[in-house]
Image (cartoon, rainbow, N blue to C red):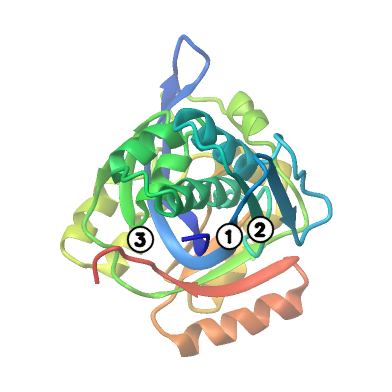
Amino acid sequence: MDEISLKALAKINLGLDVLGQREDGYHEVRMVMQSIHLYDRVEIKKTKSPQIHVQTNLYYLPVDENNLVYKAAALMKEEFKIREGVRITLQKFIPVAAGMAGGSSDAAAVLVGMNRMFHLGLKQNRLMELGLRLGADVPFCVMRGTALAEGIGEKLTALPPMPKCPVLIAKPAVSISTRQVYEQLKLTDSTQHPNIDGIIENMKSKNLRGVAENMGNILETVSIRQYPVIREIKALMKENGAMNAIMSGSGPTVFGLYHSEKDIRGAYDALKQSGLAKNVYTSEIHNNRR
């Protein structure tokens, strides 16, 4: 196999809670991660020269070691003494710096793709271990589906598959620094935490509305204060039929869960007309098990 093309799926956080800050500065989290059918396209080709070449459709993205796909390819070459080089073509569709793990998913696709291309025979767990060296979200992006993430996000437990439903995604024209959001997060005895266990219990009983009603993201307390447009998008989605709408990751992307394609179509049109979001997409839940 001399070339391979893969889909790098975006993720949303159905629930995101922060339990506290560790001595090493990282935050202890508890999250429900979910893959969706919004994806980048990652194409990898072998080259005779040993170099790594990256090209992308977005002019402002780095194509050197500052890009996670480059780092992923370099890690695989070094770890498994791969002499050939690779040319990686990255077609970006997942919004950048949006709380949807686009870069992490691209890196995961490179790990998976090079494993297949070079017949390394690595199991998923080994690829996830390698992914953790690139970033906390990369192991989940290798795993995909539905998972509980704990620790700094690296401790993953597969969950029952999320009930299928349409998903509306909207990213306003702002960018948010994940590090700054965590630095500004203040946890007190009165802080309201999302009900992560409630989400999981409703997944087990395949209760879509129950999952939606329990969704929550503690980082909204920081991001909405800085960018009230996030609250406006959430409200517009709910006014137009969303069972619930919350921010994904540290934002600024907001997603809403809907019962039907008819419901989501009206909400999509309303969001486009509102001008609140720069990017608006419709998608659906991705499950590893059908």
Give the class, few, some or many, for how many residues have Cα within 10 Å of label 3's Cα (few <14, many ≥20).
some
Distance from the alpha carbon under mark 1 to that under mark 2: 5 Å
State which tag comes first along the sequence, 1 or 2. Answer: 1
- In the picture provided, is 89 more to the left or to the right than 1? right
Circles 3 and 1, Cβ within 8 Å, touching? The answer is no
Quickly name the residue at label 3.
Answer: 213
Asked which secondary structure carries label 2, the reply is: strand
Distance from the alpha carbon under mark 3 to that under mark 1: 35 Å
Residue type (three-letter) at the residue carrying disc 3:
Glu
Residue under the point 65% across and 46% down: 224
Verify CB contact (< 8 Å) between mark 1 and mark 2: yes
Between circles 3 and 1, the one closer to the viewer is 1
Q: Residue at x 38, y 44 (%)?
A: 194
From what the image shows, is residue 148 above or below residue 74?
below
Which tag, 3 or 2, sits closer to the chain's start? 2
Residue lying furthest bottom in this view? Answer: 262
Q: Residue at x 67, y 75 (%)?
A: 271
Q: Residue at x 62, y 40 (%)?
A: 68
Counting from the top left corner in percent of width and height, residue 187 is at 49, 25
Whole-percent x and y of residue 12? 47, 55
Residue 30 is tagged as none
Q: Write down the residue under mark 1.
A: 42
How far apart, in angstroms, are the residues tagged by discs 3 and 2?
Answer: 36 Å
Q: Amino acid at mark 2?
A: Leu
Q: Where residue 110 appears, x then y in whole percent? A: 52, 49
Write down the residue under mark 2. Answer: 90
Q: Picture quarter containing residue 279?
A: bottom right
State which tag comes first along the sequence, 3 or 1: 1
| Residue most extreme to the top | 23
Can you give x and y, in whole percent of width and height, for residue 259 in the image? 39, 80
Amino acid type, residue under disc 1 in the picture: Val
